Structures are given as C-alpha cells and as structure tokens.
Amino acid sequence: MSELKFEELTSRIIGFAIEVHSHLVPGLLESVYEECIAYELEIAESALNDKTNPNYLKEIILDKGYRIDLLVDEKVVIEIKSVEALNTVHEAQVLTLMKLAEIPVGLLLNFNVTSLRKGIRRFVM
C-alpha cells in the first residue's frame, strides 16, 4: 500500500474507518477506534510509523513530544476523535501535527457520529 498516491491512500484509510465505524457504536473511547483502524491497516500491509516525536524549543529538547494517533506510510497523519462535534481546535491540532512531522496530508476522524461521513475532515498542506 505504500506506493499509493495520497488520494488513493486516504480513500483506503477512510474505507477502513467506515468499516470500523459500522461495527462499533458511537461514543467509545478514541483508543478503541485507533486500535481497530491500526488492525485494519496492518491487515492491508500498510506501514504504521512511530507516532511520537520530540519537540524542540531552540536547542532544548522537550521530553513531552507530540503524539500522532496514527501515521500511515509516513504520508498521512490520522487524528481520531470521539467528540460531540469537531471544532477549530481539533483542526488546528491536525495541522500542527502535520507541520511538525512534515507530513503533507492529514485526516481528522470523529467517530461519535451516526454516519462517519459527517465526521471526516481531510487536510493538505
């Protein structure tokens, strides 16, 4: 799956997310959805990358690195939420993670919705 173009890759990821959402009820912890999507990606032989990186402030390494929920093929940041509604803070979080990791594409997925299509945001830098 690592050779797929961004649109194809994000479409496949969204397909996996919809599959997970169809089997689980809304309102579970974000970690449950994250684990299930990671499982689907592993079955598809996608490369899940290290999700924690240190932050730097000038020459100081901050020990509290940022955490990306899922990073696929070093191409797509996935941020998973289970909230009543997505807002600008969630969008800013994804954009910040993308910028810090130098990843050009991000998906924000909110699983606390009746139809996952209402909880998907895609970002490109």
Image (spheres, helix red, strand yellow):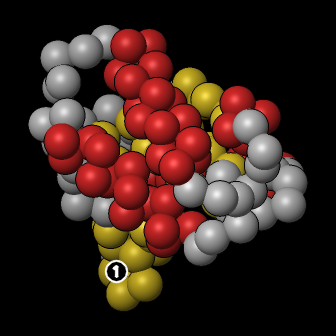
Residue at point 30%, 44% (across, down) = 40
> What quarter of the picture does the C terminus occupy?
top right
**Residue in the foreground of this view, choosing between 75 and 120:** 120
Furthest-front residue in this view: 23
Residue 115 image position (x, y, % from top left): 74, 37
Which residue lies under the disc numbered 1? 61
Residue at point 57%, 42% (across, down) = 22
What is the tally of numbered marks visible in this picture?
1
Residue 102 image position (x, y, % from top left): 39, 41
Residue 98 image position (x, y, % from top left): 49, 44
Q: Is residue 36 left or right of residue 105?
A: left
**Residue in the foreground of this view, choosing between 83 and 4:** 83
Res 93 → quadrant:
bottom right
- Whether 35 is drawn above or below 10: the answer is below
Tag 1, which secondary structure?
A: strand
> What quarter of the picture does the N terminus occupy?
top left
Furthest-bottom residue in this view: 63
Q: Amino acid at mark 1?
A: Ile
Furthest-left residue in this view: 45
Examine the rendering and report whether any part of residue 36 can be seen: yes
Residue at point 38%, 13% (across, down) = 8
**Residue in the foreground of this view, choosing between 33 and 100:** 33
Q: Residues within 10 Å of mark 1 (few under 14, many from 20)?
A: few
Residue at point 46%, 28% (across, down) = 15
**Residue in the foreground of this view, choosing between 103 and 21:** 21
Examine the rendering and report whether any part of residue 56 can be seen: no
